[in-house]
Amino acid sequence: MATDKKQAAAYAKALGLDDIRFADIHVPLLPFASHMPIVENAACIAVLFKAYRPAEAAPSGYIPLSSYYPAAHFSYNAAKAFEAHLAARGHRALYTSALDAKAAALRTGGYIGDNGFYYHPKLGSLVCIQTVITDAFAPDIIDVNQSQCLHCGACVRACPSGGVGDLSRCLRQHLNKRIPAFLRGDVYQLIGCEKCQSVCPINTQEKAKPYVFAIDKALDGSCLDTLRHLIGANMVRPRRIASQAALYAANTKQHAFLPQLQKLADAADEPLRTHAQWACDQINGGAMHDQA
């Protein structure tokens, strides 16, 4: 059964996605992963976009969740539904995370900003990108987009750690392990950092109402089931969540959580033990025990 691009776009919008574009899959495949799955007779990569806005601050006693992760989980489920929709209409289709989504998106237009993020021509860089390989459509024919980056330096100035241009100093690169001491003071939400994107004049400056979680529940793990439902089980690792909450409590000087933090500093497994000890030191105004 034939499916045209207008029908596909309407279905994608009905799923809650903000745009769909169709990238050439044939030449060249690099920089895509060499082990990526290929659909027989695949004609294109359907590139699906979901926009989001950075979260507002949370009230005292709570930690806000980065808006990216609920949007990413939503777009993943929408991409799987889009894959099933194409299959039900007799097409071959395969959702895959093995592709370099940013590279696929660039084949449909857009550009890379000075902060290293992909910028959608209409949605800016605050987008989640999913990819479905399919034989259902021919790729779009596009003109190469010229970068609209203003090179204004706002992203450089906004990053407190010098991560723009040096990913080794970017907080996002360290969220799954012990966060270096020089980055711990940068944690301002649960998972992720959008500081360089939030100040970009090309992006929307509107904020979203935050998903918030009680800090004590993030520290003791009693909010994990809710988090798994919201952002997916792969992102919700107990020590990661507790570590982020500990650092956030320290950075917002929330003394009420000192007893809970001290227990973690005394008995938790690494890297949570180090993060909790650092948090205790910061709240107490003492010397940091770990500088690594």
Image: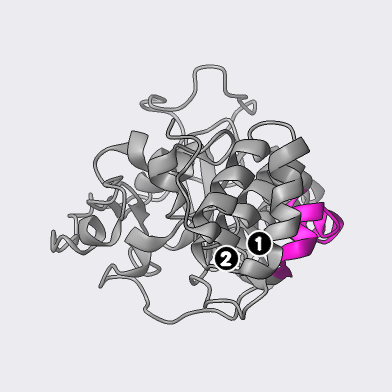
Secondary structure at badge 1 equals helix
Q: Residue at x 50, y 17 (%)?
A: 34
- In the image: residue 240, left or right of residue 23: right
Q: Is residue 225 above or below residue 116?
A: below
Q: How many marks are shown on the rendered structure?
A: 2
Question: What's the magenta region?
Answer: 213-232
- Which quadrant holds the C terminus? top left
Task: Provide the secondary structure element on which disc 2 rests.
Answer: loop
In front of the other: 136 or 118: 118
Which residue is at 72% across, 68% downward? Answer: 213
Which sits in the foreground, 54 or 204? 54
Check residue 218 for magenta coloring: yes
Q: Position of residue 250 (x, y in %)?
A: 55, 59
The residue lying at 19 percent from left, 55 percent from top is 147
The image position of residue 284, as x and y in percent, is 54, 58
Residue 16 in sight from this viewpoint:
no
For disc 2, the marked residue is 67
Q: Residues within 10 Å of mark 2 (few under 14, many from 20)?
A: many
Q: Which residue is mark 1?
A: 70
Look at label 1 and name its amino acid: Pro
- Depicted 131 relative to depicted 113: above or below: above
- Cα separation, mark 1 vs mark 2, equals 6 Å
Report if the CB atoms under discs 1 and 2 are less than 8 Å apart: yes
Q: Which mark is residue 110?
A: none
Asked where in the image residue 124 lies, by quadrant, the reply is: bottom left
Amino acid type, callout 2: Ser
What secondary structure do most residues of the magenta stretch adopt? helix
Q: Is residue 40 visible?
A: yes
